[in-house]
Amino acid sequence: MALKGRHWVMIWLLAFLVAAGSVVTRQNAALRIARALNQTRDSLSSLRSRRADLERRLRQAASRTVLVPRAQALGLRLPADSEIVILPVPDTSAP
Amino acid sequence: MAKVTTRISFIEGSLGVLLLALLVRAAQVQLLQGARWANEARQARTEHVVLEAPRGALLDRHGTPIALTQETYHVGIAPNELRDPDRDPAAIARVLHLPLMQVMSELDRHYAYFAGPFTAGTVQGLRDVRGVHLEPVLNRFYPSPDFARAIIGRVGDPGQKPSGLERTLDTLLAGTPGAAVVLKDRAGRQYDSPARRIQSPVPGNDVVLTLDAELQEIAQRSLRLALEKMDADGGDVVMLDPATGEVLAVASELRDGGARPSAFIDAYEPGSVAKIFTAGALIAGHRITLSDRVSGEGGKYKMLDRTLVDDHPLPSLNLADAIRVSSNIAMAKFVTRLDPDAEYGMLRDFGLGTPTGIEFPAEASGRLELPKTWSRPTPTSLAIGYEVSVTPLQIAAAYGAIANDGILLEPTLVREVRAPGGEILYRHEPEPVRRVVSPQVARELRQLLAGVVSSTGTGASAALATFTLAAKTGTARRVVKGHYQAGAYTASFAALFPAEHPQMVVVVKIDNPRKGSYFAAETAAPVTRAMLEQALASRTVALDRARLSAAAPAAGGGELEDDPGVAPYVVSWPPAADTAAPAPPRPVPDVSGRTLRDAVRLLHRRGFHVVIKGWGNVEKTWPAAGAQANAGSLVTVFGDTPQ
């Protein structure tokens, strides 16, 4: 059966719709992925910020300014140098 | 019918003309003006943005972060876009930790803007609030804001120059900004589509400093406590590795809490700390023997232009006694054996009067006049540390030369420069400036200094029970507005620790101590001992404990001069790397095919730092498996699924 003119119009219209639909779908998918990527970046940034904050607090909590007064309050003190014994490393080169 | 035909022809003709006009216009727009319209359309729909390059990190010698770059945010709010204008302001104020009144007042405007900057964690709760627009901006972050603040400096606000090391190292740290094109709608808002990168930003290099975080904290805390206890105006501490010239700690404090890098930029008259340099000139020039003695003049010596007084008078003194009890009278007598050029030359060779060359902006050179400008009392003044001004860093470098068998090294604050990928671009090697004195003379100077910390020396209060120390005290009158101020002194103490094979030079300076004694023996010397005890008790401080254990005599051991077991001091050249230097290179293990977790564990066990690129199983590493890399260096692990 020979295709009439209106059939060709339908076919071209359908082809156009399919092409346009695929473009829209791809764009939507790209935007969805871009949003997900941005969210992941935001999460990463947030986690890095959290880590930096924790590191700062850790450094502060472990600093001498905080630890020494606490240790002294517990009755501890810094050892005098005579109380520090550095063990000599055994000479392993000897037979 | 003719009428109809005519009408149809007319309509057809009109349509034809219109079609032709359309074609002509289309040709004009597409062919003749195409480039211009395309450009306008591009400008309306796209925007070029600059991608800021992350600034490189500053790390201490053990990798502890000192300055990092962190993504922060400015917050913009379009009030007309808020879903719930009644409740949203309160939520925004709560999240941003701002007063509600301030937020409400800003929201009265067309577009509210809060510069912050706010951290990513802070703004997390605002990401889904409609009408809130987050503007990311890279911000410099200092985990310990007080850590060597005056030395590290700050990046400053946009348009302002950085200060301190942030300024000196700016070209290394800054990186190269990138560029990208983003799509925007008719209202100018950017789409959530990925940007098209024209040029990716290149992050700045990481710089590993020579500072030791633990020693720095010890120095800062000790100095701060000392200033409070002595009610002093300010002070400085410099710790230096004499074998490499690496500065291990620099603390500068003002009583009012101000941060000023005075250890590098403020010169002062060192007083008796400088006597050892004149002693060096006397010994090196064979102008004296250690048995030569001069009268102590009963502690008071009247010269033509001044009267010198000794605080610890002795009937007669040799050079060792003069240094040990810090006799001005003996040094004034001994210096007459030197001609001015020899005295000047020695002081100059020790680096006085010239900048040390450390990587710091506006380092002071101090003052040392040429002999032709000297007045008659100048040689005596120089011999006892007056008419010359130095920075604490210059004194540390000069004492480092005595520790280093007579070789003056250029001090440095930069240990390594690493590219963003981890490869090492620069590693500091000791940079000799000149040989100041022979190894024999340097050894004799160290023995003179060791006498200062003996039980009869002025530095006895710095003595450690187990380890020997070689040091010199200095208490000098302070110059205020060009005149010596009555009752104002600078107390300083320069020490080599330990006396045999020194691993550290410590210089402590206290400006104008008011409470208690002003003598260095009772101010700066005990501070030095306290810092050394803390350093010894710390596990992480860059001290070679193996060498210390070999050098440490039994507790209660005799003085250095009396110890027959002291081996001659020998410095190999080039000097051996210090304890914190990387261990010998080792092969990178083959981790390909393993899971990232396994690979990282294995690499950590082998002593490497690890950076991961991608995910999945390991595809390769850089440096490649089998390549030699230093322990502590960075190994990049590439997953088989790229990022």
Image (cartoon, coloured by chain):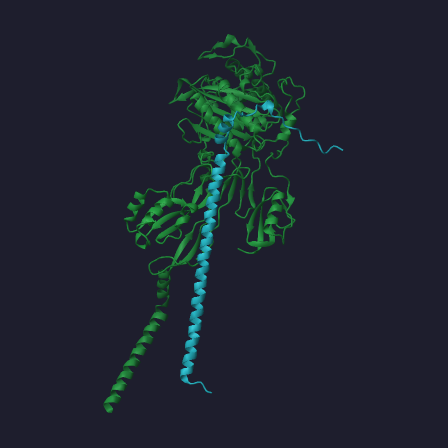
Going 32% across and 48% down the picture, which residue do you hit?
A: B89
Tell which of B602 and B121 is nearer to you. B121
Compared to residue B22, the image places residue B516 above or below, namely above
Q: State the quadrant of the N terminus of chain B.
A: bottom left
Tell which of B70 and B133 is nearer to you. B133
Compared to residue B185, the image places residue B549 above or below, namely above
Expressed as whole percent of the image width and height from the top left, the position of residue B456 reads 56, 14
Residue B337 in view, yes or no: no
Expressed as whole percent of the image width and height from the top left, the position of residue A56 reads 47, 39
Compared to residue B643, the image places residue A55 above or below, namely above
Expressed as whole percent of the image width and height from the top left, the position of residue B599 reads 61, 49
Tell which of B434 and B551 is nearer to you. B551
User: Looking at the colours in the rendered structure, which chain would you say is drawn in cyan?
Assistant: A
Going 42% across and 85% down the picture, which residue do you hit?
A: A4
Residue extending furthest bottom?
B1
Residue extending furthest left?
B3
Q: Quadrant of residue B98?
A: top left
Q: Quadrant of residue B518?
A: top left
Residue B565 in view, yes or no: yes
Q: Quadrant of residue B401?
A: top right
Left or right placement of residue B15 versus residue B337 in this view: left
Expressed as whole percent of the image width and height from the top left, the position of residue B259 reads 42, 31
Compared to residue B530, the image places residue B50 above or below, namely below
Q: Colour of chain B?
A: green
Residue extending furthest right?
A95
**Count of marks, rendered view:** 0
